[in-house]
Amino acid sequence: MIIHSYDFKVRDEHRASFNRLSKLVFGIDFEAWYQKGAWDDRYNCHSIVANNQIIANVSVSKMDMVINGESKRALQIGTVMTQPEHRGKGLSKQLMEYVLESYEDTCDLFYLFANSTVLEFYPKFGFTTLPEHKFYLNLSFQPKNNLDFLDKLDVSNEKHWNLIKQMLVSRKPISKHFGIKNNEGLFQFYALNVFHECLYYSRTDDAIIVCKHDGELLHLYDVISDKQLDIEALVSRITTNQTKKVRFHFTPDQLLGKVYVEPFGKKEDVLFVRPVSDLGELPAFCIPKLAHA
């Protein structure tokens, strides 16, 4: 029997079963996300149940993707998982076929990220790989060295959490070449579970910045703003004397003439796409990190 998230997410027993499976397979738990009210109707699970336990699941995240300035209806497939004792029975195949058939007429493309252990699984359903790229900027300016304009955000602070939710609603996509819209719930999941130590509010920019310093390298994951910001100027303010290079975990439109580009390595997840409509010619790009399901 296939059940859906709108059937089970409000049922404590089924939701607990889903969380046990996700912790077993991926080491992640959706409970805090649910309790915060961030599990919205854009994240839908399709699960197989046996003995009142969820034994297999395929989830769909609905969002809009901006590709070369055009808005596309995108469905990202994720949280593909099966209880170990039920693997090899074709349950993931059954769910994938169900999802693809159910949503085919509602989107312009399906996409997903897969690790090296399952690269042969998704081509069976019409998916092909697309190469992503890493964007780096070598610093040629003197950092400001005054980070007083940055306020550390605490997701357990109600005021901070409400600020995050408010700014997500009106944000502009980080890139017109390859950006994402309407993924508020997914960002909140990352804020709660992955990047809670990397969230800052910039009073200068009226923006939320997701970044982390790693020695001489600054990782810039996302910038949440309702206007287009000068990314190079922002970078100059958030770097330090130690910073020599910045990696953008998205496509930095404004700096494409200044950054250098490298293909993703073998250790990074592979992007699979099944287009329903023509995507056109694609330049080097990186799907924003915080849009990965």
Image (cartoon, grey):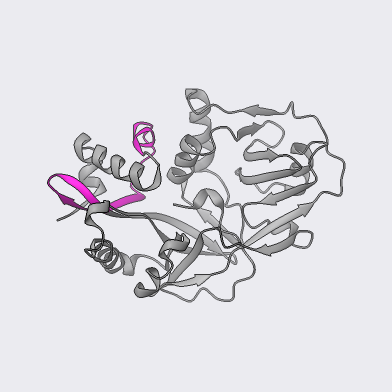
Q: Determine the image quadrant of residue 70.
A: bottom right
Residue 219, percent from left and from top: 67, 45
Residue 157 % position (x, y): 50, 23
Q: Residue 16: give x, y in percent of width and height.
A: 25, 37
Q: Is residue 208 above or below residue 62?
A: above
Q: Residue at x 71, y 43 (%)?
A: 218
Q: Which residue is more in the foreground, 268 or 35?
A: 268
Say which residue appears at 46% left-offset and 39% top-offset: 188
User: Is 199 or 223 nearer to us in this picture?
Assistant: 199
Regarding residue 230, the answer to whether it shows in the image is: no
Eyeballing the image, is 160 above or below 137?
Answer: above
Q: Quadrant of residue 36?
A: top left
Q: Residue furthest front?
A: 85
Rendered view: 84 above or below 110: above
Residue farthest toward the left in the current orientation of the protein: 51
Quadrant, the N terminus: bottom left
| Residue 143 in view here | yes
Q: Is residue 26 left or right of residue 134?
A: left
| Residue drawn at x 29%, y 45% as measured from the top left | 21
**Residue 234 magenta-highlighted:** no
108 horizontally vs 18: left or right = right
Q: Residue at x 69, y 51 (%)?
A: 247
* Vertical arrangement, residue 224 with respect to residue 57, above or below: above
Image location of residue 86, percent across then percent down: 22, 56
Total numbered labels: 0
| Start-end of magenta stretch | 30-56
